[in-house]
Image (tube, helix red, strand yellow):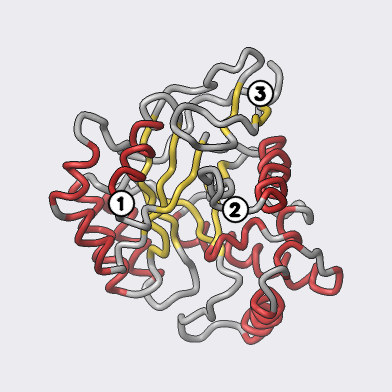
Amino acid sequence: MKPTTFTSNINETGVEAQPVGPKGKSLRTGRLIINADDWGRDRETTDRTLDCVRRGTVSSVSAMVFMEDSERAAGIARDHGIDTGLHLNFTSAFSALGLPSQLVEHQKCVSQYLLRHRLSQVVFHPGLIRSFEYVLTAQRDEFIRLYGQEPRRLDGHHHMHLCANVLFGGLLPPGTTVRRNFSFEPGEKSSGNRCYRRVTDWALDRHHRLTNFFFSIQPLAPLDRLQRIVNLSRQFIVEVETHPQDPAEYAFLTGDGIDNLVGTCVIASRYDVGPSETGR
């Protein structure tokens, strides 16, 4: 089957960059995935996210390792059968105790580079090849230790899994599900920015499995923006990123806001992009 391609046309919802098949048809059945980031970062984050999972307003979580609540969060995820991916962290200091000094130093070097300038993530740094590989591999190995399996899904804290050293360094395991770039409505970003995002999504799609669209739950207002996102999920696979440790997002996910918004649309019970379309 031909690989997924991307069109820059504006669809009826006003959103760009929709993946299409050879005849412009959607490649997958629609699905609304609400994924909570930062699982295990600290106790409050884990507990609030678990509350949302139990209520059915969060489909899946992305777990941080080497953080203060990573061990406890992993046990909870295993006990409750929570769909968990790896939330790669290159920018926030690891907060678990007793970590190897080499790991801490490598992550510090990577973090300082990525946070130095807003364009650092799009520039490949040959001097940090070993540090990026070390930090990513250490997190992958720790996820396996905590969760008893390879991470089948990966994304990144501050979306740094899409930085040049990770993406073009080939550090993401082929065949895994990987979070794509944000999808934007017309006028939200410059043409150059949208072009770069389309190129990186195309590179991702060659070796990984992606959703059709990816949005942040914020801003929560106006609601018509979120309603357009929900409507997209009736035809396409849509991931919505949320952070339940944020009081406004937590209140929305545990109150009437999410029920009134979703209506008859069902929130997925796990992160599932459906069968592979390209034989990966």
Quadrant housing residue 117: bottom right
Q: How far apart, in angstroms, are the residues tagged by discs 2 and 1?
A: 19 Å
The answer to which of marks 2 and 3 sits earlier in the sequence is 2
Up-down relation of residue 79 to residue 29 (above or below) = below
Answer left or right for 28 relative to 106: left
Residue drawn at x 62%, y 19% as measured from the top left: 21
Answer left or right for 171 relative to 217: right
The label on residue 123 is none
Q: Secondary structure under badge 3?
A: loop
Residue to which mark 2 is pinned: 189
Q: Residues within 10 Å of mark 1 (few under 14, many from 20)?
A: few
Q: Which residue type carries mark 3? A: Gly
Residue 127 in percent (x, y) is at 85, 74
Q: Residues within 10 Å of mark 2 (few under 14, many from 20)?
A: few
Residue 245 in percent (x, y) is at 30, 68
Residue to which mark 3 is pinned: 279
The answer to which of marks 1 and 3 sits earlier in the sequence is 1
Q: Secondary structure under badge 1?
A: loop
Q: Residues within 10 Å of mark 3 (few under 14, many from 20)?
A: few
Q: Residue furthest top?
A: 23
Answer left or right for 194 relative to 223: right
Q: How far apart, in angstroms, are the residues tagged by discs 2 and 3?
A: 33 Å
Q: Which residue type carries mark 1? A: Pro
Residue drawn at x 37%, y 57% as measured from the top left: 218
The label on residue 222 is 1
Answer left or right for 219 relative to 211: left
Up-down relation of residue 248 to residue 29 (above or below) = below
